[in-house]
């Protein structure tokens, strides 16, 4: 009789919630996952096992109870007394950018004599965006220097010292004469002055993620996504109107990814959310065709930054077309350690190599 009553009432007023931290994380950073078990009745649950699936890219400490398959199957066992609430926070290591979602938690309760098990599935709806990792500011100096030289030479992209546009935190690359010492003393952190540009500049970043080789080169594609995210943040901070376009699919619309970022807005969250959701592989527009489509728009005096690992003759031909009508093209080429450093001598575009270093 006791066993029958327990089987009927063990899950009543038993609430289980699993949720990620409310804010997004960056690739390589740590995040948290919280389990909450609350028993709102007199009847205790001596043995309760909570199970849910985690993507294996969200690492868990070795001492955690988990089994590894295509996904990480996380299991935790609790003994829940009457009217008790248990909360546990699990540290996660974000090894890879992505969009991670937990849809369900499975409960397994042991019977009173531990001879039987009872089961219940509880729907969950928690998600975590892991943005692409930030590449080193020092590594961004070369492409930003090349890009800045193009813009200054063609469009007079210089700051107006009389057009004050506010202040921001010092980021390690600002000259000392930009530091506002009074504001720094008041805020407790170094602050630098910002000035509006004398001309408005619009740049289009073209991210190519095609990986058509038999042996996949995922490291180069992932680095291309990181470069795009970091360059976009840097350009927007430098008062450039920015379009980011890619042959990657937008998970929300199913169309190719398109994001516009206004100059000086400093908000790249929308772009990073979409980049986090990018799935590699699948039916994508080829690199050359993707660039050809952009060239067909026949923009004049425009500036392009192409981030692509693909160095085929078709891609070079497309870059020639893209540079027509007085356009300027900067080609960033991710390559693996041990490969020959990309060297491109061409009047139509400027190419720079970017070595893909191991991501921690």
Image: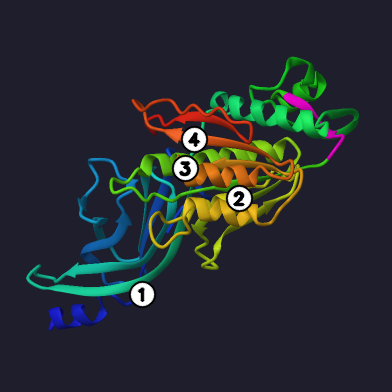
- Mark 4 against mark 1, which lies toward the viewer? 4
Where on the picture, by quarter, is residue 310?
top left
In the rendered image, which residue does mark 1 sit on? 13
Going from the N terminus, do you reach mark 3 or mark 2 first? 2
Give the image location of residue 278, x and y in percent: 46, 55
Name the residue furthest top: 176
Judged left or right of residue 153, residue 65 is left
* Secondary element at tag 2: helix
In the rendered image, which residue does mark 3 sit on? 313
Question: Real-space Cα distance between discs 4 and 1?
Answer: 58 Å
In the rendered image, which residue does mark 4 sit on? 333
Q: Residues within 10 Å of mark 2 (few under 14, many from 20)?
A: few
Question: Real-space Cα distance between discs 2 and 4?
Answer: 25 Å
> Does the magenta segment cover residue 196?
yes
- The residue stretch that appears in magenta: 191-199
In the rendered image, which residue does mark 2 sit on? 269
* Secondary element at tag 3: helix
Chief secondary structure of the magenta span? strand
Give the image location of residue 202, x and y in percent: 74, 44
The quarter of the rendered structure image containing the C terminus is top left
Where on the picture, by quarter, is residue 45?
bottom left
Judged left or right of residue 64, residue 229 is right
Going from the N terminus, do you reach mark 4 or mark 1 first? 1
- Mark 3 against mark 4, which lies toward the viewer? 3
Question: Real-space Cα distance between discs 1 and 3?
Answer: 66 Å
Going from the N terminus, do you reach mark 1 or mark 2 first? 1
Query: Which one is in front, 189 or 172?
Result: 172
Question: Real-space Cα distance between discs 3 and 2?
Answer: 35 Å
* Secondary element at tag 4: strand
Going from the N terminus, do you reach mark 2 or mark 4 first? 2
Going from the N terminus, do you reach mark 1 or mark 3 first? 1
Give the image location of residue 150, x and y in percent: 71, 31
């Amino acid at each position: 009789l006791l066993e029958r009553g327990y089987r009927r009432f063990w899950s009543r007023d038993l609430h289980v919630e699993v949720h990620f931290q409310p804010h997004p994380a960056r690739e390589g950073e740590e995040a948290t996952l919280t389990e909450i078990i609350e028993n709102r009745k007199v009847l205790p649950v001596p043995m309760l096992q909570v199970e849910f699936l985690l993507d294996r890219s969200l690492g868990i400490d070795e001492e955690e109870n988990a089994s590894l398959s295509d996904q990480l199957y996380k299991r935790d066992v609790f003994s829940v007394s009457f009217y008790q609430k248990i909360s546990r926070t699990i540290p996660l290591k974000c090894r890879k950018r992505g969009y991670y979602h937990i849809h369900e938690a499975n409960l397994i309760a042991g019977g009173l004599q531990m001879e039987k098990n009872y089961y219940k599935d509880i729907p969950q709806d928690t998600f975590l965006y892991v943005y692409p990792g930030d590449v080193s500011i020092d590594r961004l100096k070369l492409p930003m220097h090349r890009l800045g030289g193009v813009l200054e030479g063609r469009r007079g992209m210089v700051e107006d010292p009389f057009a004050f546009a506010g202040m921001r935190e010092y980021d390690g690359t600002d000259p000392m004469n930009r530091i506002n010492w009074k504001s720094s003393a008041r805020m407790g952190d170094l602050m630098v002055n910002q000035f509006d540009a004398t001309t408005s500049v619009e740049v289009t970043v073209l991210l190519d993620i095609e990986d058509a080789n038999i042996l996949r080169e995922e490291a180069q594609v992932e680095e291309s996504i990181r470069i795009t995210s970091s360059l976009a943040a840097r350009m927007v901070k430098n008062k450039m109107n920015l379009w980011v376009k890619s042959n990657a699919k937008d998970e929300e619309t199913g169309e190719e990814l398109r994001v516009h970022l206004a100059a000086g807005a400093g908000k790249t969250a929308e772009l990073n959310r979409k980049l986090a959701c990018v799935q590699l592989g699948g039916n994508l527009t080829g690199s050359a065709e993707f660039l050809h489509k952009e060239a067909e728009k026949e923009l004049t005096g425009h500036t392009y930054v192409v981030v692509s690992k693909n160095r085929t003759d078709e891609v070079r031909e497309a870059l020639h077309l893209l540079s027509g009508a007085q356009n300027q093209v900067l080609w960033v080429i991710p390559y693996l350690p041990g490969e020959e450093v990309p060297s491109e001598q061409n009047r139509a575009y400027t190419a720079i190599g970017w070595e893909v270093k191991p991501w921690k």
